Image (tube, rainbow, N blue to C red):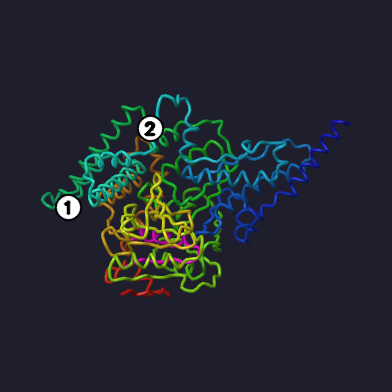
Amino acid sequence: MSEGRAEGDNLGALENIRCKLDYKKVEGYSLDEQQVSCIENDTMNTLVVAGAGTGKTTTIIGKIKWILKNWFSKRQLAQKSTEPPPKVLVVSFTHASKDELERRILSEILQDDLVFKIYHPGDFVKVETFHSLALRMVKGLNFEDFKLEVSGFEGFLKNLMESTTATDAPDLALAEEKAERFSHLYSLLQNYHVSISSLQRLVREKFHYFWQRDELQKLQASLLELEKYIRGYQESLKSTGSVDFPGLLEIAKTSLDTNFSYDYVIIDEYQDISPLEYLLVKSLREIHCFKLFCVGDDWQTIYQFAGSEISLILNFEKCWGETKVFKIERTYRFPEKLAELSGSFIMQNRAQLMKQIRGKRLDEDDQVVEINGPSERTDLNALYYFLLSLPIHAKIFLIGRYNFDIRKISHCEYLTVEAYEDKFQIIMRERPDLEISFLSAHKSKGLQADYVFIINCRDATLGFPSRVEEDELAGLVRELAILKLSNNKDTGGSKDTGGVFQFFSDFLLERKPSDSDFAFSEERRLFYVAMTRARKKILFLTVKDKESPFILELRENSNLKTYYLD
């Protein structure tokens, strides 16, 4: 009798849990039809293409609640079933986003506290970064024997160059740009398994008729310099017993823990995935055939310099097999005028997935504004007066193309810059209530503010868009990757590697005309990201006769409101 009573009590608890688990409502907000549709889909491969501010994280949380609710429903039908809950792995890219995801997931499902009378949340939900996942997947290693080098090749270069560069700001800016460029090259070499020696051979073969040309001399000099830096970096890793992130991912691909088993793998911000990260998940799937649920926005692919490969989202079905694709197109962040303007702007890129982002209605006029002055001094004064006019306790972002654009703000006598680690807070004496921050466009991704000012919208080498073209060597790396991957050659003796990467070569070949047809494809995505941080209004600071080509385009093709200053 007591056993029956206990079972009955347990079933009663489960019934209460089932009733409380409402996956259609997350963090107090009701999900829209598009979100619910993708959550309820349970095919092997699901891709959710979601625009900026459309609730990607809430969709992921809703999916986890649906998985849990579905399990309880099946358990109730089986009555005495003791089947454990499905195991869900959620993967993100940064520690900050991982911590935020974990906090919000736990906060939401902990509301159904009866669940945890049976299972701890860690029993069925695990939130990881790709690199923490790789660490857990590596077996047979004593982790005390090596250190994880988090600053990577770019950090190594910046430290090296800063120690040998004068403190003059232009010199430092050029050194930073050079470090980023070489770091980009290193990421490409790692992602596509291209060696320096094979790249040197390609340079000789491609330019052997032009030994006297400046292009060849420049390429050879860059290659030698890159080779020197890579050798120094690898020696530094070896001397300290360290492994960097690409090295860790390579180890994890072949050092798999067979006890790893998940029923669902959810990847947030899938557009940022690199070939190495893709292969890591691919290897994990070979152990256990989990269902894959990926959420991302190809319009926000802005980390190709750091190794992300846009073809992995644009060619998702080629990567993973038959796929159900959903779109989430209602943004809850920015107004409809900005939604229309930013959508038409980004779709000038040919190789982007079509979405129709619908913004929220907002009564405020002039949602998209250009402040055009005769000099940089004038637009700084205009920035000051616009800030004065903003509502009390408004949150403001000042966004530059580069981190060093903060120099422009530091020249404004009305504003004080306070640095906290890698963050910049702006203090305005007349308006201490305003929450003002400076961010680079890359660091602004995933964040939002009431009002956003994009500074330095000039037509200049280091303007926005940046005219620092992708190094010729980067193009050669991609070209060599195409040859390698399509011919299954030079892949470490594994023909399978070429097959895995075949779609890369196919995509790169298909994409070449598009890239040459339209300039600044990634800069355009970066500008889109900066624009879509604004909840109420976006303002561009420009200089007369030096306007960014993006601003001229917006003027011509949209209802951009321009204030011309004397």
Picture layout, residue 79 above or below residue 448? above
The residues tagged by marks 1 and 2 sit, at their Cα atoms, a distance apart of: 35 Å
Query: Which image quadrant is residue 302 in?
Result: bottom left
Q: Position of residue 333 (x, y in %)?
A: 53, 62
Q: Which residue is label 2 attached to? A: 243
Residue that carries the numbered disc 1 in the rendered image: 215
Give the magenta part as a residue range. Answer: 520-542
Q: Is residue 353 visible?
A: yes
Location of residue 20 with respect to 357 vertically, above or below? above
Give the image location of residue 236, x and y in percent.
Answer: 30, 31
The label on residue 551 is: none
| The N terminus, quarter of image | top right
> Does 115 sit above or below residue 472?
above
Name the kind of residue labelled 1 in the image. Answer: Glu
Label 1, secondary structure: give it.
helix
| Residue 521, magenta (yes or no) | yes
For this rendering, which residue is in front, 433 or 544?
Answer: 433
Q: Is residue 204 visible?
A: no
Q: Residue at x 53, y 50 (%)?
A: 294
> In the depicted view, which residue is nearer to us: 124 or 475?
124
Q: Which residue is drawn at 28% across and 54% down?
A: 470
Q: In this view, does 30 lie to the left or right of 273?
A: right
User: Within 10 Å of the Cα at label 2, are there few (<14), some (14-19), or many (20+) other Cα atoms?
Assistant: some
231 horizontally vs 103: left or right: left
Instruction: Name the residue type under label 2.
Output: Val
